[in-house]
Amino acid sequence: MQDPASFSDRTIGRVEVKETTCYMCACRCGIRVHLRDGEVRYIEGNPNHPLNQGVICAKGSSGIMKQYSPARLTQPLRRRPDAERGTSAFEAISWEEAFSLLAERLERLRAEDPKRFALFTGRDQMQALTGLFAKQFGTPNYAAHGGFCSVNMAAGLIYTIGGSFWEFGGPDLDRAKLFVMIGTAEDHHSNPLKIAISQFKRRGGRFISINPIRTGYSAIADEWVPIRPGTDGALLLALIHEIIQQGLYDREFLIQYTNAAELVVDDPEREDYGLFFRAEMRVEEGCFDPDNKLWWDRAIGPIGTHTPGADPRLLGSYQLPDGTPVKPSFQLLKERVEDYTPEWAARITGIPAETIRRLAHEMGVTARDETIELPIQWTDCWDNEHASVTGNPVAFHAMRGLAAHSNGFQTIRALGILMTVLGTIDRPGGFRHKAPFPRPIPPCPKPPHGPEAVQPNTPLDGMPLGWPAKPEDLFVDEQGEAVRLDKAFSWEYPLSVHGLMHNVITNAWRGDPYRIDTLLLFMANMAWNSTMNTAAVRDMLVDKDEDGEYKIPFLVVCDAFSSEMVAFADLVLPDTTYLERHDVLSMLDRPISEFDGPVDAVRIPVLPPKGECRPFQDVLIELGTRLGLPAFVTEDGRRKYRDYPDFIVNYETSPGSGIGFLAGWRGKGGEKFLKGEPNPRQWEMYASNGCVYHHELPRSYQYMRNWNKGYLHWARAHGMTRYAEPIVLHVYSEVLQRFRLAAQGKRPGRQPPERLRQRVATYFDPLPFYHEPLETGLIDTHRYPLNALTQRPMAMYHSWDSQNAWLRQIHSHNYLFMSPRVGAANGFDDGDWVWVESPHGRVRCQCRFSEAVEPGTVWTWNAIGKAAGAWGLSPQADEARKGFLLNHLIAEELPPNPAGAHLSNADPVTGQAAWFDLRVRVYKAAADEPAVTSPQFDPMPRLPGQGRPRGKWQAYVAGLFRK
């Protein structure tokens, strides 16, 4: 070893420092990569980056070992003709062979029936491009990972407040006095959130964490409130109950900026029952909510909303001059939560009633009595001038712990309403939006409306993913049945705005609703940790029909590593790592915006691709060109874009719009921002500016953006929203009521199939309500009394990092953590081997006792367990012998029930995968059983082009032994 104080890399080689954007998790921090003679030596945070400000985590600094992982794929591979699928028997082929094979097949499918091609992507950040490719191809069968991640969070809040947590909004901890975190693990927005929490606590802020498990953020909270999984909605409704009962809601905010005072028709016999009464007036057509509704003024009675000088009532029951009975929607909310008392919630959540009352009181009093005022002038959409911006300093943050339940949508609606009644939306110290949000409720893009949208050799008529506002927006046939393979946007899951990737393989195997030909998966480990019912899904991938043909005829997998899914591919396309490719974090997709304005970023290669690896973005551009897809070729069929970087520079959302994938340094000389002509030196200018562009809004545009006239006109001018109309918060959801009326037969137009009427009528309630998770009502919970959860460990992200030599030293295998009470009740000790069993299967693993978990819950780290031989690891590695997955225990479909025999184990509104609804029992393994996790699978061999295994100590040293 050399003494770093007296020795420098510069003395023995050429040293460079290159800036790019990390992708060791989805946080996407700015990094500086130090190289010596073209080898990565060190990765540090970029101190000038607005997101992480130089902070870097263990994952980010360990990216060096991901680059040199022996799991890297380096050549295109084709399954050998004499080999069975799933045996990892491949032969190396050239890229030209791979492109020819794939283009020939896809060209035939596009000419015959485009929906027989399905493209589903996992944890990527390029959904604007992959979605564009799918639309241009003409297939409706496209989605990314959101349906099995946190679509309930996105949909539940966007359908309520016009924005959501993480990329599109978050807690303003710079000014909050009270911070409440619910159902959040350590991975989402981790570095910026850790920075913010540390500063918040130093300023004396109070931090409450509500979570079944006390790890990560919860471990440093001032108060940990353990809760039974899947019962968060009951807690939130009880908090709303208390805040209304105690009069701690923000009346002025509710009147001016929400639909709380708007009058709802209260006659069950009418077709418009439960809809807002709308005055007869001419309104502009659009995807926004027209301002033609009524308030009940204390002095005058019915009056148009936002009439100057009006003093509307929030409570009461009234009759309009034509005899129509109406109530303000806030009155309906008050009635809804009347029975949701703290005592009721205590029985469900396990949280004492007095604790619930205290939390509600603390939230309400902090919001009311510690108001913030900033000297920022602004004008609202009704032309009222405001001398300042005020805020109620109670901030929330929530993620997958709320989302990944089959009752998650209504739970998150309840969270949005709690934040709203406290008056915290886009105000100092509360929840603040990030560009390009807020957007209309719901946003404007819509899916196709019927099977006629899919035509040979024609782009899809509609967006593959969209935001339905009424039954007519569903993607169903004349019988009301699904057109998509995953059944998204059908009556089974009407608001499935991110699709249902977790059901794709099962549906394709069953041929429900039809058989497909080719399934292309990118960055999606659907044979392991990204799927439910793992062992059965692996069997489906190799199952054949009566003619001896695979039920899923052709599987294409694009990945950078030899994941479990690669073994089942017919064609393998080797992807690059994030250090080897151009990439964009775009305002058209999932940017990294700050509260004060839009931020986008890029990745620029710091190393050449390893072997014959090729970025998936380039693969799509090449395929789009070879197939002649309109967006990728000129009118006479010539190539339009040289490669992906050229596409990013020159693509515009419409000819001459000036809006492309990147907002920074537009215009021919890079002198324009957000909007401008393509700039041929745009990549170079990003590279000169830390690979990030940050546009700071005028202070008068940084708050109250749902109703801020200046901001909304600016957002419309720069393509972030189509309309400059106010985005009133939806305490009461007329969108949901439209679907419910159709299910009840009270609305003309599209109707659900008979088997689904009760399901839609029940779950499409315009006000949040609590119901137990769907599977819970269909299984024996006495036999399976425990809730089972997974969390992503702070040092790893999905299955990417178990092949990382440095991070494996932190976690090489996982345990099942539980309260000592569970062991005492079932006769086993800390460290014993146990079986954890669900109605669908069982897993053998080691247990660990912990007091930092709710007593009725067991949990483990996600995705550490690996199939033997996968990810370049030895078949004897801890990950395979001691690591395990709970995925084996989770069914992707509910037990047969009156609504159908093959419904997804998912939220009935959005199709969100219900990972956390799992119920189990735990018992001691027999003394003569092997000390190895179960189930086990045949080891996956090394693949052509994979690097050789390194010696034990060499595996932990980066770069030196690559050559």
Image (tube, rainbow, N blue to C red):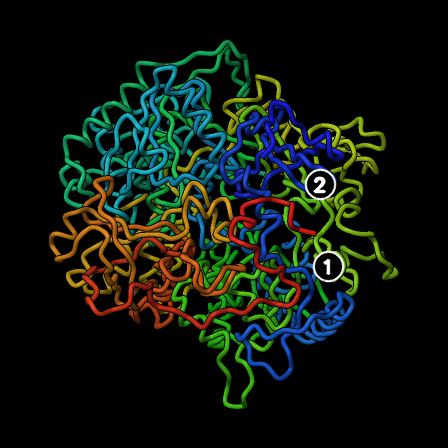
Near-viewer residue (752 or 705): 705
Where 877 sits versus 420, above or below? below
Where 754 sits versus 150, above or below? below
Which quadrant, please, contains the N terminus?
top right
Q: What secondary structure is found at the residue carrying circle 1?
A: loop
Where 691 sits versus 945, above or below? above
- The residue indicated by pointer 2 is 606
- The residue indicated by pointer 1 is 612
Which residue type carries mark 2? Val
Q: Callout 2: few (<14), some (14-19), or many (20+) C-alpha neighbours within 10 Å?
A: many
The residues tagged by marks 1 and 2 sit, at their Cα atoms, a distance apart of 16 Å
Near-viewer residue (538 or 588): 538
Q: Quadrant of residue 699?
A: top right
Where 241 sits versus 890, above or below? above
Q: Callout 1: few (<14), some (14-19), or many (20+) C-alpha neighbours within 10 Å?
A: some
Which residue type carries mark 1? Glu
Q: What secondary structure is found at the residue carrying circle 2?
A: loop
Q: Quadrant of residue 62?
A: top right
Seen at 58% across and 21% down, the residue is: 701
In this picture, residue 730 sits left or right of residue 447? left
Near-viewer residue (39 or 92): 39
